Amino acid sequence: MFEVKVEKVQPSKRKMFIKVPIQKVQKTKEDIINHLKKTVNIKGFRKGKIPKEIILKNYGKDIDEDVKRDLLEEGYRFCISENNLSVVSDPVFLNVKDFNEEGFYFEVEVEVKPDIELKDYKGIKISQKPYEVTQEDIDKSIKQLKSAFSSLEDSHEQAKPNDVVVFDIKAKDVQTGVEIKDLTGKDLYVQLGTNQLITEVENAIVGMKENEEKTITVTFPAEHSIKSIAGKQIELSITLKSIKKVIEPELNDEFVQKINKDFKTVNDLIEDIKKRLLENKRLQEIERQKEELLEKLLDAHDFELPQTVVSKETSNLIMDFVKDAYYRGIDLKQEEYKPAKLRERFEPEAIKRVKATFLLLEIADKENIDVSGEEIRNAIEKEANISGKNFEQLYKEYEEKGMLPLIKVDLLSDKVLDFLLENAVKEEAV
């Protein structure tokens, strides 16, 4: 049917040379003509009875293009199947010739799954660090609970840490008079002492009273994290609109019974907090061990990665960062956020992720580790429950967007890491 040859251009790149015999070209063209006979309308002819010559006269160029498109796709797929290639990139068609008396010729370049020589992946030595729940951990959790059940009360005293305030602020560059949008806002709602404000603004508000106005001038250091004010002298005009005192509930048996009807005493709450914190620390230690294990696995293996896959992953990381930066109000016009800078910044992480994925999938294949359709559905159902979305709609959305294979890869990678962790040698950290 096709004459094919594959050449190894690079470790992860293949070039296909494909010849289509004239008989195959003619057969494909006849099939397209016969299809058009049954479907097109040409004045003066009954559908299905249109002569071939009339079809060619009206649709000749389109037919040739359709023949070429079908043969490119079919020849490419045939070559992949015949040579058992694991393609990981879109095909790039090269040197596509016109039809001649011998048939049709074209070339294709693709990137394939890298050849990986697996080293020892069982018995990797990793550290095992102890973990415990401290009184500080418990106190912090109790403080968070009390804060969640707190109420607000109007205050006519001076603003102090822990108060909730509403204020307007205007900022301008003293030298140019230009407004600094990063520090300008109206009806800003903030709890003092929670690191939501830059230190200079919070220090100015502490001690102010309701409806008081204050103007201060601050010279910010050149290394300040907010680039628009770094190294500049800024005038800040603050109007404090309201102050509310946070009234925290008293930690007693009545309070803990409001939190959970199964709690009878404060001690019940504390024991529950200890249990939950201990489980969280256990899971955190497992994740740390997996990260350490993965780093050692990556260091032990060296192979060339398909550049198109790395490039795509880098672009995905950049896109996620840009979206997040946009919603956080970061000025993306700054030098450090130019495309070349972002690519340089995120490519190392992309390389690590791509390498890890290929390596873990190779181990999965060798160990016959797989992910079932039910496991994929369970993962999506869990996500739907967390986000409050309808499971069937979310599943359909992922299916239509072609995301199910990506979800499977993520689940499979986690499964392999679990397997590697079970087979690792854990040594107590000194």
Image: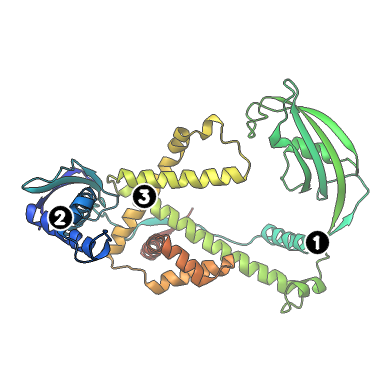
Q: Amino acid at mark 1?
A: Ser
Mark closer to the observer (2, 1): 2
Seen as rendered, the residue at the extreme left is: 102
Label 3 or label 2, whichever lies nearer to me, is: 2
Residue 369: where, in percent of width, then height? 32, 67
Front position in the image: 389 or 127: 389
Task: Residue 150: give its label.
Answer: 1
Q: Which residue is mark 2?
A: 53
Residue 180, placed above or below residue 264: above
Disc count in the image? 3
Colouring chosen for the image of the structure: rainbow
Kind of residue at disc 3: Val
Q: Would you say 259 lies left or right of 205 here?
A: left
Visible residue check, residue 75: no
> Which badge, 3 or 2, comes first in the chain's sequence?
2
In percent of width and height, residue 23 lies at 7, 56
The location of residue 269, given as percent across then percent down, is 72, 71
* Element marked by disc 3: helix
The residue carrying mark 3 is 354
Q: Are marks 2 and 1 in contact (CB under 8 Å)?
A: no
Where does the image place residue 277, in percent across and percent down from the top left? 62, 64
Q: How many neighbours does mark 2 have within 10 angstroms: few (below 14), some (14-19), or many (20 or more)?
A: few
| Residue sitting at x 78%, y 42% | 186
Between the C-alphas of marks 1 and 3, the distance is: 46 Å
Disc 2 secondary structure class: helix
Cα separation between marks 2 and 1: 85 Å
Would you identify the image quadrant in which residue 280 lies? bottom right
First in sequence: mark 1 vs mark 3: 1
Q: Is residue 397 visible?
A: yes
